[in-house]
Amino acid sequence: MVDVSPQSQLIPNLPDVIALQCLARIPHSHHPKLFLISKSWRSTLNSSALYNTQSLLRTTETFLYLNLCINFTFHWYTLISHKLFPVCSMPVKSIRSDFAVLGSKIYVIGRSISEIPSNNMWVFLLMRIGREFVTTGVVNGKIYVMGGCVRLWGQGLCDRG
Amino acid sequence: MVKLKSNDDKEFEVEEAAVIQSEMIKNMIEDGCATSVIPLPNIDSKTLIKVIEYLNKHINMGKAAETGEEDDLKEFDEQFVNMGWEELFDVIMAANYLNIHELMELCCQSAADRLKNKSVRAVREMLKITNDLTEEEEQEIINDAPWAFEGPEIDDTVN
C-alpha cells in the first residue's frame, strides 16, 4: 500500500492547507471538471473547508438558483453564463417546503417525507415539530422558521431544533 | 541590512525595508529576536533568491501608485510567476513560512489560473496525481453538471 501523508492528499508533496489556498481561487464554474481529478479533489471542492477558505480570501461567488413548477412538478435550475441548466443534485423532490440560503448550503425546510438524505449542497433541516408550508428567513446567520401546518399531510420529523 | 541564511548554508544580505514585507521576520526584528544572521531552515538558496528578488522589486509598492510604476510591477509579477510547478510550489511554501501575504496571493492565484482551463489528464500529469475514481463515479460527476463539460476545447498541454 502506498504511504500517503494525510496532509498531502490533494497534491503530492504540498500540504493540503496550502493546496486549498490555490483551489479556493478557482471559479466555481470550473469545479465539476476538477471533481474528476481524484476522490480527494471532489470531496475538497464540495467541502465547508473550501468555503471557509474562500470566505477568508473573499473569493466566494453568488449564484442564482430557480425552483420552477412545470406541469405540476418542481424543477431546479441554475444560471451559468446567461443560460439555465438543470440542477441534478437534489436527492429527493421537495413538496410544500420552503428554502433558506446560508453560507454554501441551501436548506430545505418542512416537507412530507420520512427519509432525510443530504449531500453537498442541500441540507434537509429537521424540526422538533414536523410541518409544511412554513415561511423562513435568515437573520444574522440564523434561520428562523415561522408558521406552517402541523401534521395534516406531513410525517412527524425527528427533533433537532 | 539583514542577513538571511538558506538551509544549504548560503547567506544573503537584504535591505530591512524589503525584508520586513515578511511578517515573520518583521516580528522577529520588532521583538529583538533577529540575530546577526536569520537562519531559514525550510528554504533552499534557489527559492530564497526568488523570494528576495520579489521583495526587492516590491520594496516601494506603496509608492508605486504615486509614481506611476504600477504597470511595471504588474509586468514584473507576470514574469515572476513564469516558472515550473515545482519551483512555484517551493515559492508558495516559502511565502507561507515567511508570511508574505502578497507573494502568497500572487503565486496561489497563478496556480489557480493555470489549473482552471487545463484538461483533467493534463492536471493529473502536471501534479503527479493518481486517479482513484471509479468509472461510475466519473459518470455521476458528468451527469450532475453536463454544462461544465461543454464549450470550447480545453487546454491539454502539460506546463
Image (cartoon, coloured by chain):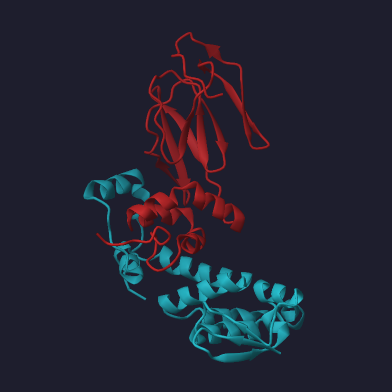
Chain colours: A red, B cyan
Quarter of the view holding residue A13: bottom left
In depth, the one of A46 and A69 nearer the eye is A46
Q: Give above or below for A127 relative to A9.
A: above
- Residue B44 rendering spot, x and y as whole percentages: 49, 83
- Residue A133 rendering spot, x and y as whole percentages: 53, 18
- Residue B33 rendering spot, x and y as whole percentages: 71, 77
Question: Seen in the image, is B91 located left or right of residue B58?
Answer: left
- Quick check: can you spot residue B1? yes
- Quick check: can you spot residue A60? no
- Which quarter shows the N terminus of chain B? bottom right
In depth, the one of A70 and A157 nearer the eye is A157
- Residue B94 rendering spot, x and y as whole percentages: 54, 75
| Residue furthest left as drawn | B135
Question: Seen in the image, is A161 located left or right of residue B145?
Answer: right
Q: Give above or below for A14 relative to B59.
A: above
Q: Residue at x 46, y 14 (%)?
A: A156
